[in-house]
Image (spheres, helix red, strand yellow):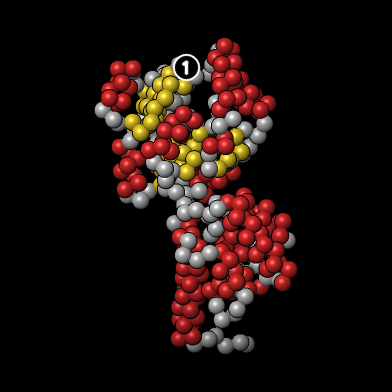
Amino acid sequence: MRPNPPEVDRVAASQAAVAARRARAEVKRAIVTGERTPLDVLHASADPANRAEFSLRVTEYITSIPNIGPTKLERILHDLAISPSKRLGGLGVHQRTSLEQFIDRWQKAKSIVQPSRLVVLAGPTAVGKGTVSTYIRENYPEVLLSVSATTRPPRPGEVEGVNYYFVDDDEFDRLIRDGELLEWATVHNAYRYGTPRGPIDAALAQGRSVLLEIDIQGARQVRAVMPQARLVFLLPPTWEELVRRLVGRGTESAEEQQRRLETAKVELAAQGEFDHAVVNGSVSQAAAEVVDLMQLRRA
């Protein structure tokens, strides 16, 4: 029978394991903050003497790189033929070379920047901005989802103060006059929408992440006022799917639907003004990609 190790050995092993985890966490933090480049860490991992880098899992390493989330990770590992269980130190020669080439291409193509605490989600009508935002509110409570003010009446199921602040024209005029809106616009030549600024400024001052779900006109205004904001354009899988979603929700008349579709064609042409594009084929995956831009998984 194999004897149990002395208690002192078990304590030492536990302390060593904790120290190793902390060292790996520090490596990931350095990548996130830009103190170290992903290529620097990858090169260091080739030497067993660099124990933190050597023992870092490939999955943790790749998802430490800004703008790469779980969805992209799965595709990257498949394309590079690397097992999710691999550690950087255990990569084969060809795997290491392929990963290095990928990281080099990624950095040049994406021009990796620091994570943004303020993300603006915009896109054409009926693309599912509200659905994605609601999913984020329910599954990522650390994100403050800004609540817009609007002059349009509530739709069935919408809740005051949760979906929107429903106000009349006089109150909306007051908000504009008193400078209480970060942005505002008239949408679809009908109702006005605006973003109250106070809660956003307070949340950012506290170090929280904030998501603004607004229209494209509003996104442009936010960029002018807060250039640090990350602008994300939500796309439908296809134009046909966008039409299906708009008609299927049954909240507008046929005339209003046609007007919104004409507007959507113009809105889709604006995606080049945005920092990132996310396809809303799956609500959970689209939400994860949006949240990835805030780097919350590494908080």
Question: What residue lies at 53% left-to-right and 64% top-to-bottom?
Answer: 37
Q: Is residue 15 above or below residue 254?
A: below
* Position in image of residue 254 (x %, y %): 59, 12
Q: How many marks?
A: 1
* Position in image of residue 55 (x %, y %): 58, 73
Q: Pick the residue in front: 22 or 188.
A: 188
Q: Secondary structure at mark 1?
A: loop
Horizontally, residue 34 falls left or right of residue 127, namely left
Res. 298 in view: yes
Question: What residue lies at 48% left-to-right and 72% top-to-bottom?
Answer: 23
Res. 82 in view: no
Horizontally, residue 57 falls left or right of residue 179, namely right
Q: Give residue 261's quadrant in the image.
A: top right
Q: Pick the residue in front: 1 or 294.
A: 294
Question: What residue lies at 27% left-to-right and 25% top-to-bottom?
Answer: 177
Q: Is residue 13 above or below residue 203?
A: below
- Residue for badge 1: 189
Question: What residue lies at 62% left-to-right and 33% top-to-bottom?
Answer: 236
For mark 1, does the 10 Å Cα neighbourhood hold few (<14), some (14 to 19), or many (20 or more) residues?
few
Q: Quadrant of the N terminus?
A: bottom right
Q: Give residue 159's quadrant in the image.
A: top left
* Position in image of residue 250 (x %, y %): 57, 18
Q: Is residue 280 above or below residue 86?
A: above
Q: Quadrant of the C terminus?
A: bottom left
Q: Give residue 126's quadrant in the image.
A: top right
* Position in image of residue 75 (x %, y %): 68, 52
Q: Amino acid at mark 1?
A: Asn
